[in-house]
Image: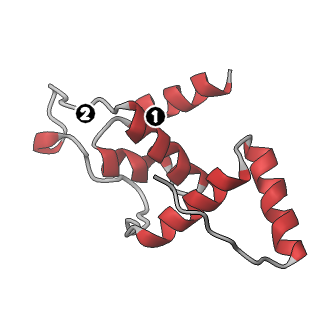
């Protein structure tokens, strides 16, 4: 279910959002939704160096990463468009950052 919402923006802001959405290849609606989602969810603190392991047991030889479903990939793309880094997303979703990079690269093709 969706709820119609009207947003009044200055023309400069609208044009800037339009350019960003065009550059990222997503609809303006998705860009705005991603921005709103970002503001409602706690964002992990930025870290320098290594990001803590997202695997159970701290990254043992047997990795037990989660497989993401279509809804989680959709949300992940929105958060990525909103500025989340891939390591932050890997920790949030409990999956490998290399899988995220590979998935995003395959979508661009």
The residue sitting at 60% across, 26% down in the picture is: 107
Picture layout, residue 43 above or below residue 104:
below
The residue sitting at 46% across, 46% down in the picture is: 75
Of residues 63 and 95, the one nearer the viewer is 95
The residue sitting at 35% across, 31% down in the picture is: 69
Label 2: how many Cα within 10 Å (few below 14, some 14–19, many 20+): few
Of residues 101 and 75, the one nearer the viewer is 75
Q: Position of residue 48 (x, y in %)?
A: 43, 62
Q: Is residue 13 left or right of residue 84?
A: right
The disc placed on residue 44 is: none
Secondary structure category for the residue under label 1: helix
Secondary structure category for the residue under label 2: loop
Q: Is residue 54 left or right of residue 48?
A: left
| Spatial CA span between label 1 and label 2 | 12 Å
Picture layout, residue 14 above or below residue 61:
below
Q: Position of residue 28 (x, y in %)?
A: 72, 53
Label 1: how many Cα within 10 Å (few below 14, some 14–19, many 20+): some
N-term-proximal mark, 1 vs 2: 2
Q: Position of residue 50 (x, y in %)?
A: 36, 52
For the image, the number of numbered tags is: 2
Residue tagged by mark 2? 66
The disc placed on residue 100 is: 1
Q: Is residue 13 left or right of residue 87?
A: right
Q: Is residue 29 left or right of residue 91?
A: right
For the residues labelled 1 and 2, say whether their Cβ atoms are less than 8 Å apart: no
Q: Dividing the image into 4 quarters, which one contains the C terminus? A: top right
Q: How is the image coloured?
A: secondary structure
């Amino acid at each position: 279910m969706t709820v119609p919402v009207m947003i009044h923006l200055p023309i400069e802001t609208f044009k800037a959002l339009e350019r960003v959405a065009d550059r990222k290849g997503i609809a303006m609606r998705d860009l705005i939704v991603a921005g709103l989602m970002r503001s409602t969810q706690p964002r992990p603190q930025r870290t320098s160096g290594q990001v803590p392991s997202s695997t159970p047991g701290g990254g043992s030889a047997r990795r037990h990463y989660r497989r993401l479903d279509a809804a989680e990939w959709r949300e992940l793309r929105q958060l990525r468009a909103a500025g989340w880094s891939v390591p932050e997303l890997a920790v949030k979703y409990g999956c490998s950052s290399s899988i995220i990079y590979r998935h995003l690269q395959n979508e661009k093709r």
